[in-house]
Amino acid sequence: MCGIVGFVGDRPAADVLLNGLRRLEYRGYDSAGLALMGTDGALHVVKQTGKVSALAEKVRKAIPRKEVRAAHVGIAHTRWATHGLPTEANAHPQVSADGKIAVVHNGIIENYAAVRAQLEGRGVVFASQTDTEVLAHLIAAYEHGDLLAAVMEALRRVDGTYGIAVVSTEHPGQVVVARKGSPLVVGVGDGETIVASDVSAIVSMTRNVIYLQDGDVGVVTADGVRLYGLDTSASVERPVASVEWEVGAAEKEGYEHFMLKEIFEQPSSLRNALRGRLEMNRGTAILSGLNLTPRELAGIRRCVIVGCGTSLHAGMVGKYLFEGLADVPTSPEQAAEFRYCNPILAPDDLVIAISQSGETADTLAAVREAVQKGTVVAGLCNVVGSTIARETGRGVYLHAGPEIGVASTKAFTSQVAVLLLLALKMGRGRRLSREEGMTLCREIEGIPGLVEQVLAQNERIAQVAEKYAQVRDAFFIGRGILYPTALEGALKLKEISYIHAEGYQAAELKHGPIALLDESVPVVALLNDIPGKEKTLGNVEECRARKAPVIGIVTAGDEAATAAVADVIEVPRTSSYVAPIVTAVALQIFAYHVARLRGCEIDQPRNLAKSVTVE
Ligand code: F6R
């Protein structure tokens, strides 16, 4: 969602803030702004619609260079609009009427309309349509010489979620921060401190970080951070953690786009997801973070998997894995729907929350609902220390490294790989023999190599993409375990190329959507040589009879499937359980090239945000 950066130290704050914003731009990006503490005792606030590069240009023009170099304290923000259009007035920082206090904010102030009305009643004139502006005016109203106390007072009067950073001209060496429902991380450097909504804005300066927890409020100075609980006002201690990511992991490293880099990273991200987790000679998986004994695992009667978007699609694959390998009935649920349907959960159910970011508001709310109902909840997250990882307290990290491209790629394949490990582990406690487990272990171990074979098709897939890059609509069809992959292929295409794309169960197409097919509407058919292929080939014939051109994802060497389609993208032979991974990689590459050929902003598609922290 939106991104926050704040800095207190010795070097020019603008450099740190703008670099940080560039690294956070993937989170949300319709406008950006910063506030620098000027040497003249006033704040320099600059805001700009569009990208961070436009903001940097405006800062250069708006503030004399000497002033910019001399400012060592500041806050900045990149916005993904929730309240109000993406205009300069609505961009952050939002500033108090006297211009002394500036606030950047992620999240939503739910009672902002009531608070705004009260403040307006007292004569405060609002300059924006944002919910954030109420915070700036409230803090100003309570500020009597202690900024921390004023922020605390203001926060006690608002409902909703926030990660905030606040500066005041009366306290030039401080940034006050607070968190409730929106992540904030403090990076502790040598004589300088940086705060951000995401470690990717911090790692180039320091690896030592403190993750704020909900209810924490703190004063950031050049010497570090002092934290307090909003409820008690008492001082709280949070551990300093060390970030493992390499700085280069958040850079493009020669690739044209983060998405392409992340697609090509999959052999290594999958190796990281599998490392140390396969116990070959016992034919099982080691997932110690789950913190469940073999007896507890064997006692699980049902799994409910919650997630959104791509993570939900991984969860849908999980259903086929858990039921096929472990006989555990499994329901994948869209996290927001799960939360609001009053889910029926039993004590021997296991709820699994899948989230790359670990911050998705709907998934987090589903986790809280399941915890409230007394169910065991495990998290499958990529971002270490994220809220879902912390609140579930048990789970499996994906270890995929930072995913910067807004369209999720390597996280999906790692999610499916980890679900496969879990299915293997649960299966071994039930119906899988040691030999069957060992065979599956060998196949899982081979996944990164299989993905390398798909990546080797990059140019061929680009050629197919060229043929279809200008279509308006497309369908993706798959059957059984490949149905969620059809949904994922359609999601990838629509979000980065803006082509209207829909995924369907192969058999469902004839129950209505087939009315839309003609020679201008391609159908991508997932025809991997696994059980069900023959039936899907029948559905392909139905499409061809309506003149739709069919692109087949086909197992290498499968002549019958190749003959049935207009264009072929080959994937290596796998079992059903691994087919979603290799197929998803082929579809990611296809979507990437279509979007590239259409000149789309691949890493930052319009209207999207990487981490959706509002419900
Ligand atoms: C699609 C995509 C989104 C996310 C969804 C959940 O490419 O990235 O659909 O999968 O917003 O995000 P996480 O996994 O962070 O919970």
Image (cartoon, grey):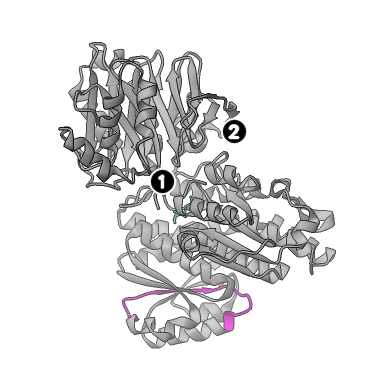
Q: Which residue is mark 1?
A: 257
Magenta includes 476? no
Choose mark 2 or mark 1, whichever is in front: 2
Q: Is residue 107 visible?
A: yes
Type of the residue with mark 1: His
Secondary structure beneath disc 2? loop
Q: Position of residue 488 (x, y in %)?
A: 47, 63
Q: Residue at x 57, y 27 (%)?
A: 238
Q: Position of residue 546 (x, y in %)?
A: 37, 86
Picture quadrant where residue 157 is located? top left
Secondary structure beneath disc 1? loop
Q: Is residue 126 visible?
A: no
Q: Nearer the viewer, residue 186 or 14?
A: 186
Q: Residue at x 57, y 56 (%)?
A: 370
Type of the residue with mark 2: Glu
Figure check: 195 above or below 581 = above
Q: Nearer the viewer, residue 358 or 515?
A: 358
Figure check: 461 above or below 193 = below
Instruction: First in sequence, mark 2 or 1: give its number.
Output: 2
Q: Position of residue 517 (x, y in %)?
A: 35, 81
Q: Quadrant of the N terminus?
A: top left
CB of residue at label 1: within 8 Å of ligand 1? no
Q: Which residue is mark 2?
A: 244
Callouts 2 and 1 close, C-beta under 8 Å: no
Q: Residue at x 50, y 32 (%)?
A: 212
In this rendering, position of residue 184 left or right of residue 41: right
Figure check: 160 above or below 580 = above
User: How far apart are labels 2 and 1 at the CA level?
Assistant: 23 Å
Prevalent SS, magenta region: loop
Which dot marks residue 71?
none
Q: Position of residue 144 (x, y in %)?
A: 30, 18
Give the extent of the magenta segment. 517-534
